[in-house]
Amino acid sequence: MDRGSRPNPIFPVVPKALCAALLLALAAQAAAQTYPNKPVRLIVPIAAGGGLDTIARPIAQKLAENLGQAIVVDNRGGASGTIAAESAKYAAPDGYTILMTSATLAIRPLLYKVPYDLARDFAPISQLTSQSHLLMANNSLPAKSVSELVALAKASPGKLNYGSVGNGSQIHLMTELFRTMTGTRIVHVPYKGITNAFPDLITGSIQIMFGSVASGQGHVRAQRVRALAISGPRRSKVFPELPTISESVPGYVVTQWYGLLAPAGTPREIVSRLHGEVVKVLRAPEVRDQLTSQGADIVGNSPEEFSAWIKTEVKKWADVVKVSGAKID
């Protein structure tokens, strides 16, 4: 063999693919070391003032302090989070766009054709909180407990209406789960948002509705509506007098959750940095106190744990859709 054709043992030939991978890794590492050097956009899939927005803003404010850069809250409501998710999906995967998300993002693909794939298009950062919903009723409704509500609904099938924040929302499916587990027939009335639904709950156009503690506690305390129970696994610190639904309907437990996602392809180093800073934010007393006053339990799990949780939620709600026969009205 011609000696000139042999690879130089001191300077071996490196495959082009490996060179490209090494360059990308070095670039990602360099980007992580200087991150962030400009404002970060936090997309919130709800109008300003909604339940998710009230969770997002204190977190954004403290995160901005920790990162040393502004966090610009970009409220993109509509289509139960699809508009926000699509915007985040196509954003540059550089850590300067992150998405506030909830259980609805996992539920909506079960009922709609959506322009995103939750597992493929996003990189989980952390689950922020978990919180129960209030089961609320119009003040004139004779039922003053879950058991009485079930008895009333069974006595008048199809006569009661329930509100939700839209087709494919968690409130839609959790009420369908309640309806299925109690053997009742209650009519779904979807709204564009919780603020649009409350006036009808107060006046009696709809008789019951689930809503977050953050969105509902003002109406409950002002006695504009009546709270019957809490949807989570234990009684709420905000409403300790309220029973859980599972005390009357064994096995019924539903919690809302909020978390942060980045576009797929965001460097692991940046995801890790964001995760670490988010955990610090959630541990800050002023943030913790503000969130717990809204009925939220702090989570702050790892990206891997959040990814596993999302998969569990997708499976859970797929089963609810199948068993309940929930569909778009």
Image: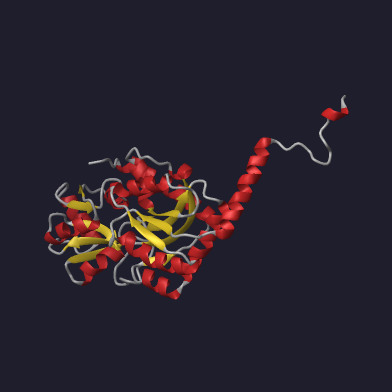
Quarter holding the N terminus is top right
Q: Position of residue 157 (x, y in %)?
A: 17, 47
At horizontal 32% and vertical 72% (from top left) the residue drawn is 240
Quarter holding the C terminus is top left
Q: Position of residue 203 (x, y in %)?
A: 12, 60
Q: Nearer the viewer, residue 156 or 227?
A: 227
Q: Quadrant of residue 256?
A: bottom left
Q: Quadrant of residue 16?
A: top right
Q: Is residue 113 visible?
A: yes
Left-right relation of 105 to 164: right
Residue 92, relative to residue 230: is it above or below?
A: above
Residue 317, relative to residue 37: is it above or below?
A: above
Q: Is residue 282 visible?
A: no
Q: Nearer the viewer, residue 213 or 29?
A: 29
Q: Position of residue 40 (x, y in %)?
A: 44, 58
Left-right relation of 181 to 226: right
Q: Position of residue 18 (x, y in %)?
A: 67, 39
